[in-house]
Image (cartoon, rainbow, N blue to C red):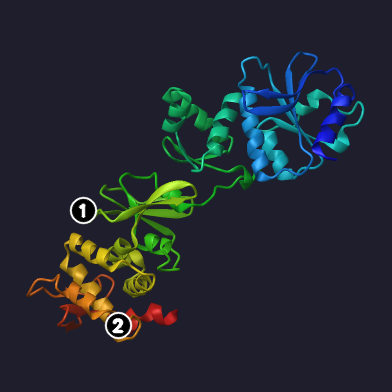
Amino acid sequence: MQELAVENWIKNNIETIFPGFTLVSSNEIYADRIEVDFHLKDEKQRDVFIEVKASELKPRDIGKLLNYYSILSNLDKVREMRYIVILPSIKKENKEILSSFGIKTLLLDNLTKGKVVFDSCLQGLKNILTPTEAEVLSFINERECSIISVDEIVQRFEYDSSYASKLLERLERKQYLERVKRGIYLYIPLEYGYENRFTPMNSLVVGSVLVDPYYFGYQTANRFHGFTTQFSPVTYICTTKTRRTHKWKSTRYKFVNLVQKKFFGFEKHLSDGCNIFIASPEKAVLDSIDKPDYSGGLSQVVAVVLNAFKRGLDKEKLLNYAIMFDSNTLIQRLGYILDILYENRYLDMNGNFVESIERLLPENTSNTFLGSVKSNEGRGSIDNKWNIIENVSIEKLLDEIVVR
């Protein structure tokens, strides 16, 4: 049956389908933006709004229904509103989602004489939302970013901070939100189930609200830019503040405290609709060379450098960032790694570029270890060009590349 035909059939059989109910209006516009198929009144003069659907609900339909419910429940003259959706069939998970908001669903096949009683619309509902909760959740659902804060609710609805905080706490108890830290929550989209709701795992979105200022760096940035496929259970966050390691679900957040002069070179990106800050490709490479242990070790860093150059790294920006880094050790390691990649025919490197790196070093530059003594040997032969103590073998340096 087409939707219009279904509506006409219901309109002609209102008294049979809903005995004791009276029809107030059909296809009326409310709040200047939504059209309601039927507005009824029950025996106690409670408002009943009915939406008719001629086919299965799609994800966007659910969002619209929740938005309509929120708008209708906050109309001034509406009394103890009930919202019913009539449709030919519905998936169990979609029915549970709507039921959790207090929205009843009725199947066309069940609309037989004397079978529909309004009180049945109130049975079996779990975690029913109040009109205010529904309005807030509808606002959260419409946003692109899944992170929501008490401050945003205060700004949007002009509630005081205490009341806004309690609202979000209630939504957390009803499993629509997951607390990230005080005053900040992660929205669990409706398509993530109802009876056993599970949280979407986006470590970048969650990590973006743990400290300010910040940017994601090291192995986290390398993976984001496609320089490595190596998985790490640790998400690395660079910040000028001191923070202890934070665990959320199965992810550990390692906060790397940087001095102010090294805190630069990050970009804004979108992740699941949320703004996040992450090291630029050039800064990700330099950070990794500076602290190889946070990027999977030196052999992994060499692979990262190779992949970054193959993906069109901005060499001029890399040089400028290397100067801003103000670290001879960093420049020595960068030049040495590029020479190794060139000599072993992994990278077709312009000699002028390597010379530009070499010119950044002052005369009589002190020797420095290629790899950290903590993770590698404390001795090795000296490369006179870069004054590098080779405490990591060439074979080990290129190990990750060979595997690939």
Seen at 80% across and 14% down, the residue is: 43
Q: Secondary structure at mark 2?
A: helix
x, y percent for residue 13: 89, 26
Vertical placement of residue 120 versus 382, above or below: above
Q: Are marks 1 and 2 in contact (CB under 8 Å)?
A: no
Type of amino acid at the residue the image marks with label 1: Val
Q: Is residue 322 visible?
A: yes
* Quadrant of the image containing the C terminus: bottom left
Vertical placement of residue 400 versus 59, above or below: below
Type of amino acid at the residue the image marks with label 2: Tyr
x, y percent for residue 249: 48, 50
Q: Residues within 10 Å of mark 2 (few under 14, many from 20)?
A: some
Q: Residues within 10 Å of mark 1 (few under 14, many from 20)?
A: few
Q: Secondary structure at mark 1?
A: loop
Vertical placement of residue 18 versus 53, above or below: above
Seen at 68% across and 33% down, the residue is: 126
Which residue was labeled with disc 2? 342
Vertical placement of residue 275 versus 120, above or below: below
x, y percent for residue 140: 53, 36
Tell whether 397 sits left or right of 101. Answer: left
Tell whether 219 sits left or right of 351. Answer: right
Report the Cα–Cα distance between label 1 and label 2: 33 Å
Front residue of this view, candidates 252 and 122: 122
Quarter of the figure with residue 264: bottom left
Q: Which mark is residue 259?
A: 1
